[in-house]
Image (cartoon, grey):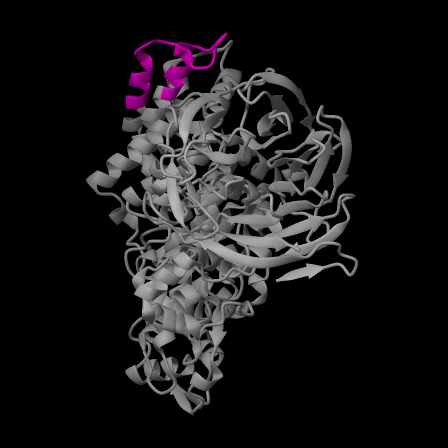
Amino acid sequence: MSTQTKSSEIVLDYVKTIGIVNNGYNGRGFANPYDIAVGGDGRIFVLNRCDPLRASAIRVGICNLEDEYLGEFGRGFGAGDEQFAWPVAMVLDSRYRLHITDEHNHRVTTYDTSGDASGNASAKYLSHWGKPGTGDGELNGPAGIAVDSSDNLFVVDQHNSRVQKFTSDGKFIANWGSFGGGDGQFNLPWGAAVDKDDNVYIADWRNNRIQKFTNDGEFLAAFGNSGEGEGQFQRPTSVAVDPEGFIYVADWGNERVQVLGPDGSFQMILRGEATVSKWAEAYFDSNPEEKAERDISNLKPELPAHLNTPYHISSQTEPYFWGPVSVSLDREGRLYVAETNRHRFQVYQKR
Amino acid sequence: MISNDTALMAHLLRRAGFGANRDELESYLEIGYDGAVEALLNPSDPGNMPDDLIRRYHVDQSELRDLPSSSAYWMYRMISTSCPMEEKTALFWHGLFATGYSKLNQARSQLNQVEMFRRSGLGSFEDLLVELSKDPAMIVWLDNNENHGASINENYGRELLELFSMGIGNYSEDDIKGCARAFTGWTLGNAEYMSVRAAKDSIWPYGRIAWHFDYREEDHDDGEKTFLGETGRFNGEDIIAIIVKQEATARFVATRLFQFFAADEITEAGEKTIEAMMATYFSSGYQIRDMLRTLFHSDYFKSEEARFARVKGPVEMVVGAIRMAGNYQDPYLGIEGVANTMFYMGQGLLRPPTVEGWHEGAEWIDSGALVERVNFVAKELSNVSSPGVRSIIERLEAGADQGVLQPSELADGCLDLLGPIQVSEETRSVLVEYASRHGDLDLNGHQPGDQAEQRVGDILRLVAATREYQLA
């Protein structure tokens, strides 16, 4: 389901859904996915944040658009090498190094994923960097992460209410921001993105807006405010910008994705239209009695008034986004929306 | 010397809440007992930990698929709310209208039921029973989704009368049948698919799908029924309207409220209070809030007889200790483990043992549960870095003569600031003796976590182990 303005300059077509809940500790499927990074070779990296019962299996899964599950890496919960506690976001740089933030361990972990296009054992752990604190280069709850054309990294340092710029191996370059609601200020910021001109966009989560900066942190613009209307946000978690400057926002609290024009003007809303994935089809092939009852069900029901909130609607309406926490783009104009609570992602194609 | 006003207010807050630290107690004392009763019975903004923060850090509490995460989610609300009576009321109805995860495999919908208790738990009992009968978790729990016009399932109809309103002995088997027929067609959306998923504990393909009420008119038996002497083409609402008129219902509700909010045992004076609550039940149009107002203003409730007359349930125990210590006010990695301690003490949120709920009173305490209770509270209260414990230390210092406390002052001060808690002379002498081992306590220049502060923590730990601390 999507809604667009009459003058909308962008059209997104639903392509498919990939995923199934993974109730175990490895293998095909996802466990509370929190971010997606798409490589130029077609590999899709999915960060599984995992619930506490399955924390020992926190990992990155790899698949492709052909629904092949290619492998996974990571060593589960902890503070050791390749371990994570509360991983949040990740980004691929130009050399296929995958950088993953961890808001509990206050650090960034880097893998080299350039090795093997088949995906098997394709990630080689390189290092982790960052330490807790408030000084330059120190981190307090790193969340979103983005990379510019020079492979500089922008890490959203949420509890320090700032953005920090690092080299790709973690050397501090600069930072900006403070706590508040004014221009260039943040309140528990989350997602980050860089556009083709190397401007930086930040999902200013608790201020319900997107802020745009130059590569050096000079404030350029802010888009959106609190609400459920068009162009309004409720706790935006993630932002992505395509080569034409369209801005995609995971409007997480409203359980939707919004697209803005390069000037911040509202373009369209996606509410989600998930279908049965290939992996889900395999499940139903083995469970025909469940499939039979599902086929005669209405998965977009009318709900009583007390359940008429985006969260409750999504909890009861399986095709809709539920916990759309991240938006990612590939080079072919595809949009990937990761849904934490539905253990899947939906893919859309820009016309 | 503890004033009666302070002791009475602390008593009210143990019953209509989870106990109170001294700051809370003083804010209630400012509005007086009557004002406090009204504030507690008319919850406003609870100011609890916001959902957005919980969901951001706890993905499991965003999805609410599993039991430990879901009970932790409710516990967060209990420990951070400024409207404790709202949560205490929800806990009361959760125990009375016990609905368990073991059969449902649907924690999200159970939490929707808890939200319904918040929304309607202090209002009309008639409205509450209608909402309960439309609650999807209850419908599946007692098989009303299998109660069809052509083939009734009496389970919900029977328990509605026996366990949820009138009590056994006040209706016939024919009344049960009439009741069940009236609730045919009361089911949940996509009932067949949801039943298959619940029975298999299926989370596939994309996690759980929460539940909502659905009325299937074509499955409802619209024929004439006789129920408690009245005849008509009754639907569920009509049956409930008859139920709430019964004196047995008034007695049932008043008694259960009394035992949860006043005393485990019913004395002669307690019986008179129950009768007064029954009178209020009818005069107010079945309003729970008004019944509780009658209770809290009764001579019995205010008397010494009612004080410490209940064994704290595990939820009260754990939540009370956490609130006193001031911990977990922000999302905390591992919170589900904290919530699990209530289960180990015998009261897991969202998992009552049977449809009859928990057996309360003295049955809360067996040797295993007692060890769990004491250990948990001792750990919370002896941690001198906890904000609530730091506040106790600051207050002890402020009340000391030149910053120095004699052992008896240390023991009495801790008992006061944790309640005040009334203890036997024997218990007090043990506390004083322990406090005497290192002589007077000099809090001048104390630093976080130093030996002087730890001495306070040690006394608080010892108070947690007393018999009196187990009582509310």
Q: Is residue B164 above or below residue A347?
A: below
Instruction: Let me know if residue B448 is in the magenta part.
Output: yes
* Residue A265 shows up from this direction: yes
The range drawn in magenta is B429-457
Instruction: Let me know if residue B363 is in the magenta part.
Output: no
In the picture, measured across the screen, residue B260 lies left or right of residue B200, that is right
Residue A186: x and y, percent? 67, 31
* Residue B44 shows up from this direction: no
Residue B395: x and y, percent? 51, 21
In the picture, measured across the screen, residue B124 lies left or right of residue B362, that is right
Q: Is residue B44 above or below residue A99?
A: below
Q: What residue lies at 39% left-to-right and 62% top-to-bottom?
A: A281
Residue B35: x and y, percent? 60, 46
Toward the bottom, the furthest residue is B224
Q: Is residue B19 above or below residue A166?
A: below
Residue B130: x and y, percent? 48, 71
